[in-house]
Image: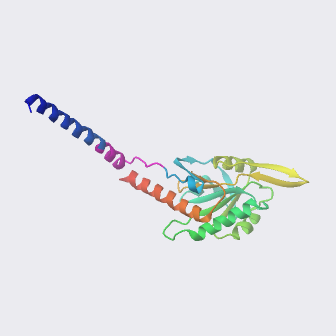
Amino acid sequence: MNRSVQVTLFALFLLVVLIFGLVVGRQVFLVDGGEPTPAPDLAEMNTYVYDQPRPLAEFTLTNENGETVTRDSLRGQWTFAFVGYTNCPDICPAAMANLRRTDKLLSNELPQPDYLLVSADPEHDTPQQLKAYTGFFGENFHGLTGDLETLRALATSLSAVFVHRQVDGELLVDHSGHFALINPDGQLAALIQPPHNPEHLAEAFERIYQWAKANRENARS
């Protein structure tokens, strides 16, 4: 092999080593530099996870104990939120029962979330009514009521809607049927569409929590 061929091969070898080093170095930088990993794909569980959680509308409402609640009150814990009303004949009782079953399936190793009913019928959903209704499902079930437009704005930021209509003199409320998962920063982290399976809900929550935890730890490193 003549010298020119040797020099060419050696230069190509150095180029390959350089490119490989840049690729590896970039991956190390992305991981060590706090680059977040993409959100898990949970489509098989009817769940959409936001890569970047979405802020909620600011609000001042009243909970089932008559206490004032704001957006900051949602900080510090995971929360499953659902837009509905206590006089709902079908969707709401089934949804709340699914959340109660989900709560019983969660591992004790996970943070225990709250479950929040955002009223779409504040005229009838007084704090007392909410307390009686949510208390049936468990001590970590809560409700919010208050000004109709404030509730509507909060629902919108949870990607939910509700519409009032009168049928034979009776108020009926058409509303979204999904669950919204709020993270401990008080932001919308995921949407979980019906039909709801408690086993899938529990698994989706665990995977979202582990993903969020890993990203937080990666950002601190």
Question: Measured from the top left, where is residue 214 in percent x and y?
Answer: 42, 56
Horizontal relation, residue 151 to residue 221: left or right: right
Question: Measured from the top left, where is residue 128 in percent x and y?
Answer: 75, 65
Question: Measured from the top left, where is residue 47 in percent x and y?
Answer: 58, 54
Which residue does the image show at 11% across and 33% down from the upper left? 6
Which residue does the image show at 77% across and 65% down from the upper left? 129
Asked where in the image residue 67 lies, by quadrant, the reply is: bottom right
Q: Is residue 201 above or below residue 156?
A: below
Is residue 34 rendered magenta in the image?
A: yes
Q: Extreme top residue here?
A: 4
Magenta span: helix, strand or loop, mainly? helix
Quadrant (top left/top right/bottom left/bottom right) for the N terminus: top left
Q: Is residue 44 above or below residue 55?
A: below
Q: Extreme front residue here?
A: 1
Which residue does the image show at 52% across and 69% down from the upper left? 107
Asked where in the image residue 65 lies, by quadrant, the reply is: bottom right
Question: Does residue 77 appear anywhere in the picture?
Answer: no
* Residue 92 or residue 21, whichever sits in front: 21
Horizontal relation, residue 121 to residue 113: left or right: right
User: Over which residues does the magenta segment extend?
Assistant: 24-38
Is residue 61 rendered magenta in the image?
A: no
Number of numbered discs overlaid on the protein picture: 0
Question: Measured from the top left, where is residue 63 in percent x and y?
Answer: 68, 61
Horizontal relation, residue 187 to residue 1: left or right: right
